[in-house]
Amino acid sequence: MEQSCIAGVYYALGNALMRNGKLNDAASKHEQSLEIVLLIHGHDKPHPVIVASLRNLGCVHEEQGKLEKALEKYENCLEMELEIYGFNETRPAIATSLNNLRNV
């Protein structure tokens, strides 16, 4: 099985676990997904898939009440999105990151 497929499975499991209130398990799956995605795309190169993994991990941390961790993930998302797309608030991804930061 290709690494990106494995990352996708962890990503989907994390989302399902979060919807079912199993936040610790969800965080673990999203962390595993992020680790694989970073291996694929690199730690120093922004990529939309990395942003999605960070955002989901931030959502789990927010639900757990770990607001500092959530804030860190959301800030990382925004930084990467600005590198990828430039400053354009009309991009849905950037608007989502700004909204997440506002809510924490």
Image (cartoon, rainbow, N blue to C red):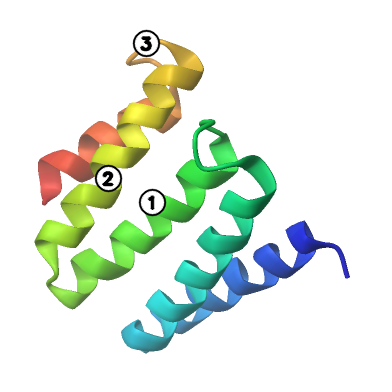
Task: Identify the residue at horizontal 34%, vertical 86% (top origin).
Answer: 24
* Tag count: 3
Q: What residue did someone put label 2 on?
A: 74
Viewer-side residue, 33 vs 9:
33
Q: Earlier in the sequence, mark 1 or mark 2?
A: 1
**Do the residues under discs 1 and 2 have CB atoms within 8 angstroms?**
yes
Helix, strand or loop for disc 2: helix
> How far apart are labels 1 and 2 at the CA level?
6 Å
> How far apart are labels 2 and 3 at the CA level?
17 Å
- For badge 3, the amino acid type reads Asn
- For badge 1, the amino acid type reads Arg
Q: What residue did someone put label 3 on?
A: 88
> How far apart are labels 1 and 3 at the CA level?
18 Å
Position of residue 92 in the picture relative to residue 41 (left or right): left
The answer to whether residue 62 is seen in the rendering is: yes
100 to 20, vertically: above or below? above
Q: What residue did someone put label 1 on?
A: 55
- Please give the label number shown on residue 15: none
x%, y% of residue 103? 13, 48
Helix, strand or loop for disc 1: helix
x%, y% of residue 12? 60, 70
37 to 5, vertically: above or below? above
- For badge 2, the amino acid type reads Tyr
Residue 2 found in image quarter: bottom right
x%, y% of residue 95? 32, 28
Helix, strand or loop for disc 3: loop
Viewer-side residue, 20 vs 42:
42
